[in-house]
Image: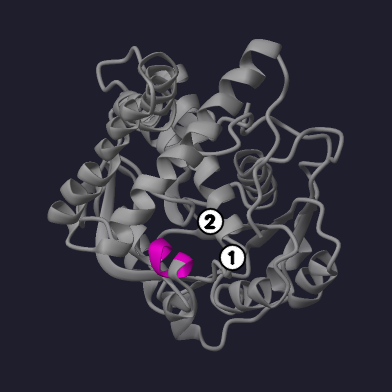
Amino acid sequence: MLWASDPAAGRQNNVLLRVACNSIEELLRMHDYKLGVVAIGRNEGDRLRRCLSSVLPVVPATVYVDSGSSDGSKQMATEMGAEVVDLDISRPFTAARARNEGLRRLLLAHPDIDFVQFVDGDCEVVEGWLDAAGKFLEDHPSYAVVCGRRRERYPERSIYNWLCDEEWNTPVGDALACGGDAMMRTTALKAVDGYRDSMIAGEEPELCLRFRQKGWRIHRLDQEMTLHDAAMTRFSQWWRRTIRSGHAYAAGAWLHGATPERHWVRETRRTWFWGILLPLSIAIAMAILGPWAALLALTYPLQWLRLLRRNGSARSSTFLVIGKFAEALGVLKFHSSRLRGAADTIIEYK
């Protein structure tokens, strides 16, 4: 269980007093609730320094979970005042497992924590977000999660960074899911036993689905939340990240496709059609009918035009079409691992 006792549970976490708040007013900003932070990362370097610097001065109860870094991240986080959890390398790394381990350590040291802000180590929390998010959860007890606007720090540096920034520009208001950066109610996390450790991608939407099944709600505020540094400058990085998206679709549909919400069934079917079935059908038709059957491939530019009319961006439409082939690889990777009974391994793009 997420909140199970630990033999060392009686020990108090001395890190609470390592970092002092700049003023009494900053402590009072936390209102009546108690807030903790769980950051996760792997070889994030200066990005992690920015991340921790954005939370430690106002939330000393901060846990950093490291997934096998070799760049000195663990030592740096310790020196900055965060409590560091080093994931056991004998088990596969996943962001879901890292967040669970971080939350477990946070609650062992601070069992009275009401809300926890999860943040990826390549993100900087924007000033004012923690206060706004905590106040929202305090005022709205039926909500398990609140998130805001995650922005790319350098969208102008590459088209891949720009695509990330566009991807995160989602509607405000009640939502079906959140991303990796979000503030969550600890009672809600306990009610669903946290993240699903085995998921290597798409763990937040899967968690949010289980929240909603328990009657909890998710909300996206119209407010800046975090600055993300994707640091994607190569097509190969974007390609691997998109493979991960396909894997997430397949895993989500496999777990919850039969529920009334049909979780990610539509997305998975689209990937099967555009990335696998259509190109396979074209190849078979060419083998049987000859080169003229290649005209069936015009379906792709027609799809590009349809997407262009919908979103008004030629760049976005182009990568949406190309991305279906990468997503297809992710779908195949998931089902291949499932049929072989093999554990999935994380798909890194940095």
Q: Which residue is rendered at x = 80% and y = 49% of the image?
A: 11
Horizontal placement of 307 versus 107: left or right?
A: left
Q: How is the image coloured?
A: one colour
Cβ–Cβ under 8 Å for marks 2 and 1: yes
Residue 10, horizontal then vertical, whole percent: 78, 44
The secondary structure making up most of the magenta span is: helix
Can you tell which quarter of the image residue 221 is in? Answer: bottom left
Q: Quadrant of residue 259?
A: top left
Indicate whether 342 appears above or below 223: above
Neighbor class of circle 1 (other Cα within 10 Å; few <14, some 14-19, many 20+) is: few
Tell me if mark 2 has few (under 14), some (14-19) or many (20+) residues whose alpha carbon lies within 10 angstroms of its own.
many
Do we see residue 159 in this rendering?
A: yes
Considering only vertical position in the picture, is 287 above or below 312?
above
Which residue is under mark 2? 238
Front in this rendered view, residue 41 or 276: 276
Magenta run includes residue 205: no
Which residue has dot 1 on it?
234
The answer for how far apart the CA atoms under marks 2 and 1 are is 7 Å
Residue reaching furthest to the left: 309
State which region is magenta.
160-164
- Disc 2 residue type (three-letter): Trp
Secondary element under disc 1, as helix, strand or loop, is loop
Choose between 293 and 341: the one closer to the eye: 293
Q: Amino acid at mark 1?
A: Arg
Looking at the rendering, which quadrant does residue 340 occupy? top right
